[in-house]
Amino acid sequence: MTSSPTDTSDFDVDPALAAAVLEIEQHVAAEGWDQPARLYALVDTGQLVEHEPALAAAMGLDESSAEGSLTPVEQDRLPPGGVLERMLEQIAWPAGVAGCAAVVERLVLPPAADDDIPEDADEAERFAREHPDRQEVRIVAGATRAGSTYCALRMRAHDDDTSVVGGGDLVPGLLALLAATLTDDDTTDIADTTDDTDATGVTE
């Protein structure tokens, strides 16, 4: 289901997750296009205030603003040439992380082009870059341990806040990868989500 990105009243949408995704979307949009992929831990704000008071104070958070909200904490940037989807297959978040979110820019082609896309990955990427009807899209997708998901999509051709599209299942493949990082398995654990990272609310 899609909706206005500022309308999080739908019963299928976790309002805390939607608010965190939209906060990230606004933060990234302010820095323009052609950015690398980003990854965020979503931390229960109340726990952040309790366990990381210095970071919470720097972000302007206190107990009154903490209830029922999630705070995005940005992780280290991907290395040049790194592929977000491959990285997500290798990681798992520690138990203290309530959810996670990712930002990635992609080229989207019209359905009529599906049959013409080459099978080779490099050729397919070149085909997409050169297609006259391609659309550049920025995706912000988030998932929580409770099973909620939310996405915000912004098209470069319609780059304004009122044209951002929100919904719970807009990018199912990416959402599934994010959700998988929140399950207990044998993948690489991300040790500490607050050391050497930036939160979206902190002025750099």
Image (tube, grey):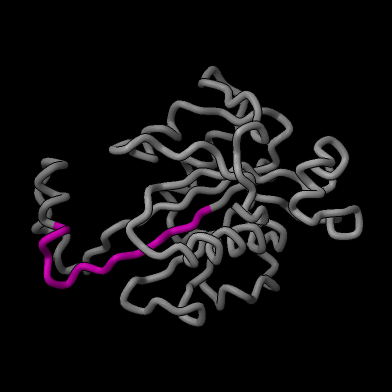
Q: Is residue 151 left or right of residue 156?
A: right
Q: Is 81 placed above or below 124 here?
A: above
Left or right: residue 63 compared with residue 78: right
Position of residue 173 relative to residue 134, above or below, is above
Residue 99 belongs to the span the image colors magenta: no
Q: Is residue 131 magenta?
A: yes
Outermost residue toward the front in this view:
204
Q: Residue at x 61, y 44 (%)?
A: 198
Who is closer to the viewer here, 187 or 43? 43
Comparing 143 with 63, the one in front is 63
* Location of residue 82 with respect to 175 vertically, above or below: above
Residue at position x 16%, y 58% in the image = 128
Q: Position of residue 34 (x, y in %)?
A: 32, 58
Count of numbered circles in the view: 0
Q: Residue furthest top?
A: 186
Relative to residue 154, is residue 184 drawn left or right? right
Task: Name the residue: 65% across, 31% down.
Answer: 195
Q: Nearer the viewer, residue 97 or 23?
A: 23
Residue in view at x 55 percent, y 66 percent: 26
Residue 59 x/y as whole percent: 74, 53
Q: Is residue 49 left or right of residue 82?
A: right
Where residue 151 appears, x then y in whole percent? 52, 60
Query: What span is colored magenta in the figure?
Result: 128-141
* Residue 95 image-quadrant placement: top right
Query: Foreground: 112 or 48?
Result: 48
Q: Residue furthest bottom?
A: 162
Q: Report x, y in % for residue 23.
A: 61, 62
Q: Is residue 136 above or below residue 180?
A: below
